[in-house]
Amino acid sequence: MNKGSLTSSVAMLILLFSIACHAKTFYVDPSGGLITNDGSEEHPWSTLQEVFEKKLISSKMFETKPAVTGGALTVKNPDAPVKPGDTLLCKNGYHGTVSAIEYYNDDWITLRAFPAHSPRIAAIEIRSACRFRLVGFTISPSFAPQFKRSTIINFSSHNWTGPIRECIAEACTCYTVPDASGWTKEQWDTLSCNGISLSGPSCTARGNVFKNVNFGISVTGDSCLADGNSVTGFAGDGMRGLGDYDVFQYNTIKNCYAVNANHDDGFQSWSLDDSGNPGGGVVYGIILRGNTIINYEDPDQPFRGTLQGIGCFDGMFSGWLVENNVVITDHWHGITLSGAENCVIVNNTVVDINEESPGPPWIRISGHKNGTPSSGCIVRNNLTTDLSCSDTGVTADHNIIVKTYDDYFVNYAGKDLHLRAECDAIDAGSDEFAVLNDHDRLGRPAGSSVDVGAYEYGAQGVKRERVLPGGGYGFSCVSKGHLLLVTLPSAGGVLTLFDGMGRVMKNVDCGGRSSLYVSLPQQSASMLLLRYKNGVSVYYRRMVFM
Ligand SMILES: [Ca+2]
Ligand SMILES: [Ca+2]
Ligand SMILES: [Ca+2]
């Protein structure tokens, strides 16, 4: 590092420090606050809706419209008291309908419930914006004086004002109505609101509760994260993921309502071509990890339909990882990818919820319906009632087909699919491509080897894995002609390329880099195995070249 860059780094640090020191907290209290106050704890503002309407937040927006990526930004509301980096603490009471349009914040602005409070909002749309964090609200259109069907939390883009990115919704409770048990079929079909929409890159939904909704969690942005949410009671699909490198992990999806033409899915994805036709493109690098998908809890639930667990029918799907999920459903499609390349389905548990047709459910990798075969896929260590994979392009091993539930599960009737002592699934898995944790996020393997299914018998301790930006199985690679662009989970380490016979083709010292181009050897193989070792962990990825 030369002296000039050292000086500028120090200056940058001082600048960051001074920004952090000046981050302020403002207060919003519907009972007793006034929008003409200064927002201090003694003199709070009235509602979040009014804070936005009265332009009390300073940010940036695109200078010229329609907004184009990389276009110049201009300061918006320059004299407003709330600046990027600040927090708005909201107290109990009704905060209205929040619409935040055109806020490209240089630093995070946090909209947060006051400790132990549960401020209410009818709905919130954050559009053409970045770096908002929404924490701890209770959000429902049923709070509004006049019910309006809408997406409850909507992180949205607009072709005039610009795209959305980097927004977070955390620990919010969202529902169309608090109790939908008396709803008619028509009410479910016409009233239920969508839970959350993440339509730009790097958005996050974490630890939220969605109840009585249409579609639960819809992601069209790339590199988004849906982590630890629950969707209970839905008319559409539990989760949808149409962006690349999205991560859906440790979510619980249960109780679907068959009230319209939508075929209910716990998770659904499909590709789109440039004209928007389904099945004409590729969805890259989705991770589905540790999710629980349950068709219904109550056999007498009204309008209970049959749920496709993980239903992905219009590929291609490339470089996906589906691990540690538990699917309990009344359908044939437990986990289905139609048109898959280099996808890994490992250590899932898939069972029927009853003894009737449809089902028992399978794990299936088949060709694309346009005839393109699947390739380079692995289906391993799964405990499932059926398996239905293409003869070519899929390596399926160490899976167990369950015939009698009581042979394997602690309490199948009670939906507890932990392994029973001394059952055949214990230590029966392969460690190759096996996962570090199980469904409970406890470390694998316990005993002599990894178990088959989503739960590791006797697992102890907690090893939370990191979510890797860019997704992929440990690391991601994209081939660009004779070059591979490899994105690593850490900086440094050694990358090794093997051919299809397991022979070393190349060792690459990654230096301090976390992303690099690797030139492929002259006589390139049609299949490559990549191994990345960083001193702590070992990661593998397989690529097939057509
Ligand atoms: Ca569907
Ligand atoms: Ca069934
Ligand atoms: Ca074991």
Image (cartoon, grey):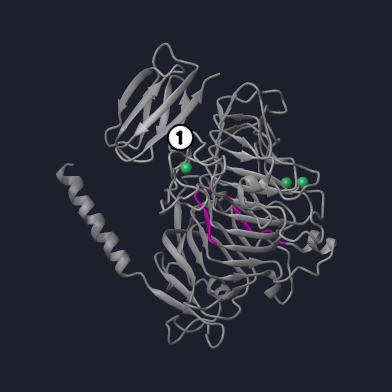
Number of numbered callouts drawn: 1
Q: Magenta stretch mostly in which secondary structure?
A: loop
Q: Is residue 285 above or below residue 483?
A: below
The percent coordinates of residue 292 (x first, y second) are: 61, 52
Indicate yes or no whether the magenta region holds residue 445.
no
* 92 relative position to 81: left or right: right
* 113 relative position to 9: left or right: right
Q: Residue at point 41% right, 27% down?
A: 530
Q: Residue at point 46% right, 73% down?
A: 88
| Quadrant of image for the N terminus | top left
Q: Nearer the viewer, residue 251 or 13?
A: 251
* 469 relative position to 353: left or right: left
Q: Nearer the viewer, residue 307 or 177?
A: 307
Q: Residue furthest top?
A: 523
* 110 relative position to 267: left or right: left
Task: Name the amino acid, label 1.
Answer: Asp
The percent coordinates of residue 463 (x first, y second) are: 41, 51
| Quadrant of image for the C terminus | top right
Q: Is residue 166 above or below residue 284?
A: below
- The image quadrant of residue 82 is bottom left
Q: Secondary structure at mark 1?
A: loop
Q: Magenta segment range?
A: 193-207
Q: Nearer the viewer, residue 392 or 449?
A: 449
Q: Is residue 40 above or below residue 258?
A: below
- The image quadrant of residue 216 is bottom right
Q: Does the rendering let one see residue 219?
A: no
Q: Residue furthest left?
A: 3
Residue on which disc 1 sits: 431
Q: Is residue 319 above or below residue 483?
A: below
